[in-house]
Every structure is written in structure tokens, then in C-alpha cells.
Image: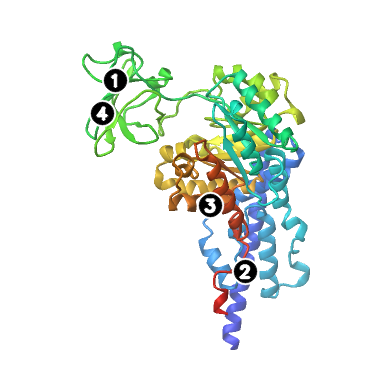
Amino acid sequence: MPTAVADKTSLHLANLYTELETLRADIADEGDGLVDQWAGWIRRADFAPSARNLACYLALRRRDLCALQEELARFGLSSLGRSESRTLESLAAITALVARAAGVPEAHQPAVPARGDFIAGNRRLEEECLRVFGVPSAHRRTRIMVTLPDSAADDQHLLRELLQRGVELVRINCAHGDEASWAATIEKLRHTEHQLGLPPRTRVLMDLAGPKLRTTTFAGASDKPRFGVGDSFWLARAPSDVPAGERAIGCSLPEVIGQLAHGDPVWVDDGELGGQVSERRHGAVRIQVTHAPSDGKRLKADKGLNFPASELAVPALTEADLAALPFVARHADIVGYSFVQGADDVARLQSALESAGRRGAQAPALLMKIETRRAVRNLPEIIVSAAGRNPTAVMIARGDLAVELGYQRLAEIQEEILWLCEAASVPVVWATQVLESLAKRGQASRGEITDAAMGVRAECVMLNKGPYILDAVDMLADVLQRMEAHQRKKTARLRALQSWQALF
């Protein structure tokens, strides 16, 4: 190498080393500051290292690292893009290599992290998976969860087939049924395990209903009006709040109507109909329709309502949830928490579980369902306040998130949730409409197969019920097993490719 080129390269490396050393020190200091803020939430000693790594990762990702990544890649050293589970360790390893290349005296070079320290985050994540999801199938790492139909207690064939296919978790939706039907389902599940000679290892998620924001129809209303772009309707507490002769629907939580502001967006039925508040009056708001199918959308009762820009004062734990919690606390391995918005909501659930007599090692694991803008914004505090006391997982509730954030942002946000959870050693459930067409109609789409393959980056994939659910389980298990040979989280494993062997 010519002397001038070598000198220029050495200068680049020396500057890069200085930049990395400064960055590493700043990340450590900022991370420690965040951990100090979180100290009151962290009661589990085995979560403390994960909390610090999450804090350091947040500090790192607050910076634009594009230029640094390009410079590292030029020397074949870029690995910050896989630093989620080992933020400081990754920085230390890169800095140590650059120091050697730059000719920094050995006494001043940072140490290369030991292999055990470098993989400690992966090990913590695996341990948390075991605590929350139980033992995985012998053939794959990613667990499969299936939502059970209301009739599961009377369908031993379904339970037997699910267990024989290696399904590790079942979900009971507490928005449906009652304690008697839930108890019968769990009893039949354990009985089926016993009949098959299996240990009682299948984890039961009991998903609290939470505050259901749904459309309602008013008594005496016989028609189901159809709306297109440019039409309007009223969202009202009662018919008396609506101008005479105008069309209106109600809301299952009428108290939220008064919390809507002029211009707030409103979405109905998973985003099929959209509009915004154009007028407010006592007990009602007028919704001007801005998005609808070309042939219009008919409004019916019990369709989901989303208010993505509205800061709603709605408790995440409803009276129905609190009434169900004593049963859930005794029988569930995992409690699913809908509409969680921040650390205060997490504390209410933890307190309610303790009041139900389940605390410490006896408490069920928690599943935080991330389904609103506020939950995304407050995700670090939700994770730390939950996992600081209980084994915890996070569900990416992609249906509600798509409506809340916009479909164009969903791909970006689901990636960011995966990254933050990996940094915190918190397992993730990949949920909403996975292989939905196959489960419901017997035929998967090409897009659904790609989506199912993305589930390998999570620790668990959830399937919803349907007449072809067993086919969906088989397909998902096959896809996950194949993809796990190639990828772990976001890291390619570089297994030998077989498809083009004939060329050699």
C-alpha cells in the first residue's frame, strides 16, 4: 500500500476509534441514567441486566448512526445492526478491533468481550421464553399459540389434534364465555394431555377483554345505513342527542364521545370506514366520512371503533375484567392485557393480581398487548414496569395497530417493537390474521406465507380459530421450521443453501 494511502487510512481509523470510544462512554452514561429512573419498577434481580441493556439500546438508537455504519462497513466491521441483545458488548468489540487496527497501544485498548458476555442477552431471552411460554417443540424454537373456539370444551378431537401437532399455547378470549365454560375448557385440555401421556405443559393464556370500543344500534332503529365518502353520521350517547331525522350509531363506552375533539379521526370495523369529527354537540359528534369502499359501507352493531389521535381516559381494566381476575389468576399461566397504555395501567393489573392472591413466583406471566399509539410511545416503560416484577411477553396486535398508526407505518413499527423487546430480553407474540385465509377458508395466499415466515423473528406466533385451523398449524409449523434453519431474530445464520447444488 502506498505510504500516503496508508497514512490516510491510519488517520481514518484513529478518528473512528475516537468516535467509537466517545460513543461507548456516552451510551453507558445515558443508559445508567435511564436505569436510575426505572429503579422503582425493577424488583426481579434476573431482569436487571436486561433493563440496563434496553436502556443502553434506547440511548444508542436515539442517534442517527447511518454515517458510522457506512464507515464501519468500509472496514468490514459493521455489527451495530445486530446489537439489540448486547449493546455495550457490540460497541466494545468493534472499538477493540478498530483500536488494534489504528495502532492504539495495547495498554489503552478496550478488552474484547468474553463470549459468555456477548451471548448473555440471547440466553436471558431464552430463559424468559421458558418462564412465559414453556418448553418449545423439539422441532422448532418459535412457539405456536392457537385461539380456542367457545366450543373447545366439547371438542376433544380438536384439542387432541392440536396437542399432537405440538402446539405449545392455547388462548382463551375472556370477552366470550364465562367462568364455567373457561373451567371446562381448561379441564378438558388437561384431561386430553393426560390421555396422550403428555405432561401438563401446554400454557393457557387467558386474554382479558378490556374496554371494548364497539358500535351499537339504538332501540327501534331497523335499518343498517350504508355510507360513502362525503356522507356523515352521528356517534351519539342516545337518540335524543341527535338532530331529528339524522342517522346515528351508538358506542359501547358512551363516555368517550365527550372526549373527542373537532378534527379527530374515527375508524370503524378495522378501518373499513373512516372519517373525522366535523361537529360537536352535547352527547354526540358528527362524523364526516373520508374513507369508504367504492360501494359504501353498511354500519352494523358490534364493529370495532378506533380513535387514534384521541387521548381517551378509559381504564384498561374494566369492571368485568376485575370480576374475572380471581378466576384468571388461579387458572391462567399467562394473563393477556388489552388496551394497556403505560406503567400506571401495568401497576393496576399487578395490584389486582396480588389482591387475587397471586404474587411473586405464584403470579402468572403477563402479556402486554400493544395496540394503540400511546402504548407504542410508552413501550419502554410498559416493558420495564411489567418485566421488572413479572415474567413478561409483548404481543404485536397488528390489526389495531394498523388502524391506529396507518397501514403504511405498521411495517416500520412492528420492526421497532421487535428490536426493543429483544434488547429487553422480552419475548414477542406475532399476532393478527396469520394464515387467516387458510384457517377460515382452507387456502392460504402468497402474502400470508411471507407474513408467516416473518413470524420466525418473534418467539411465538398466534393463529386464530377457524374450520381449517389444523391445516394452518401444520403449514405454520413447516414454515417456521424451515425459516429457523436460516435465521434467528434478524440475524442470518448462513446455513448452506441446497437449491443450487447441481451447479457445482
Q: Nearer the viewer, residue 449 or 371?
A: 449
Residue tagged 3: 454
- For badge 3, the amino acid type reads Met
The circle drawn on residue 496 is 2
Label 3 crowd bin: few (<14), some (14–19), many (20+), radius 10 Å = some
Circle on res. 248: 1
Q: Which quadrant is home to the C terminus?
A: bottom right
Q: Secondary structure at mark 2?
A: loop
Instruction: Give coordinates of residue 54: x percent, y percent.
Output: 64, 46
**Frontmost residue, 88 versus 320:** 320
The residue under label 4 is which amino acid type?
Answer: Arg
Q: CA distance from mark 3 to mark 1?
A: 41 Å
Where does residue 419 sit, x and y in percent of width and height?
A: 58, 49
Q: Earlier in the sequence, mark 2 or mark 3?
A: 3
Q: Compute the Cα span from label 4 to label 3.
A: 37 Å
Q: Residue at x 64, y 36 (%)?
A: 160
Q: Label 1 to label 2, Cα distance in Å? A: 61 Å
